[in-house]
Image (spheres, rainbow, N blue to C red):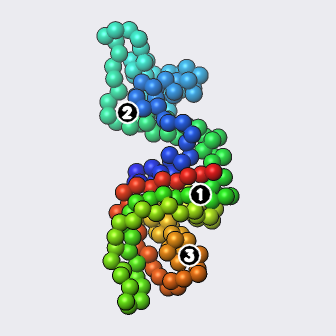
Amino acid sequence: MGQIEQGLERALRTRPVPASTEARLRFLLASHGGSTRQVATVLEVSQRTVQRWVTKKPGARRPPGPLQVQAIEEAVLARWQPRIRARRRAQAEAEGFVFHTRARFGFAAPAGSSDDPRVRWITQDLPGEVARELFAARDAGAGEQQQTVVLARALGHAYFREWGRRAHGLHIAFSDVEFADFSIG
């Protein structure tokens, strides 16, 4: 998961996801009414395996392996705050968001300007159309590169060309994203 995807995920949540595997298993059990059978079905393991992961008996407990830890994490992320995520996404698509980033920006411009890429800190309000385009790309399975193109186009228009008031024809190169954060509402 790239920086942009991680930033979007952080923006859509209001509480942090449980950090430990034990806490994640407790969340999955609680969200499935305490049924180890349903959790086992979700994680594609046996019910007995889930029981071994969560037992309180000394010596009977077995920790999940690396592949199972990854499956547990993915299951929790898919089920964490679904209504809040939907509400925050709708808010971003309607009202826009603030994009905070530190990345390398360069641009192609007419002769006489310094177009060498350099690292910049940028905080910019972006409209809901950008949020809709970004979420649509993400839903379609777009990778970090395609999401970067969407944000580069939006930042080029909003930040570098000041909403079309200057620097017409300026093409932005946006790369080496060190961090990307989104503020919604």
Q: Amino acid at mark 1?
A: Phe
115 and 16: which one is in front? Answer: 115
Please say if the residues under marks 3 and 1 sit with CB atoms less than 8 Å apart: no
Alpha carbon distance from label 1 to label 2: 33 Å
Horizontal side of residue 117 vs 44, given as left or right: left
Question: Dot 2: few (<14), some (14–19), or many (≥20) neighbours within 10 Å?
Answer: some
User: Residue at image x 45%, y 79%?
Assistant: 171
Among numbered discs 1 and 2, the one appearing first in the sequence: 2
Residue topped by disc 3: 162
Please give the name of the residue rendered at 60% of the width and 40% of the height, measured from the top-left corner: 82
Q: Earlier in the sequence, mark 3 or mark 1?
A: 1
Residue under numbered circle 2: 69
Residue at image mark 1: 97
Amino acid found under the numbered disc labelled 3: Glu
Q: CA distance from mark 3 to mark 1?
A: 17 Å
Q: Residue at x 50, y 47 (%)?
A: 9
CB atoms of marks 3 and 2 within 8 Å:
no
- Name which of mark 3 and mark 2 comes first in the sequence: 2
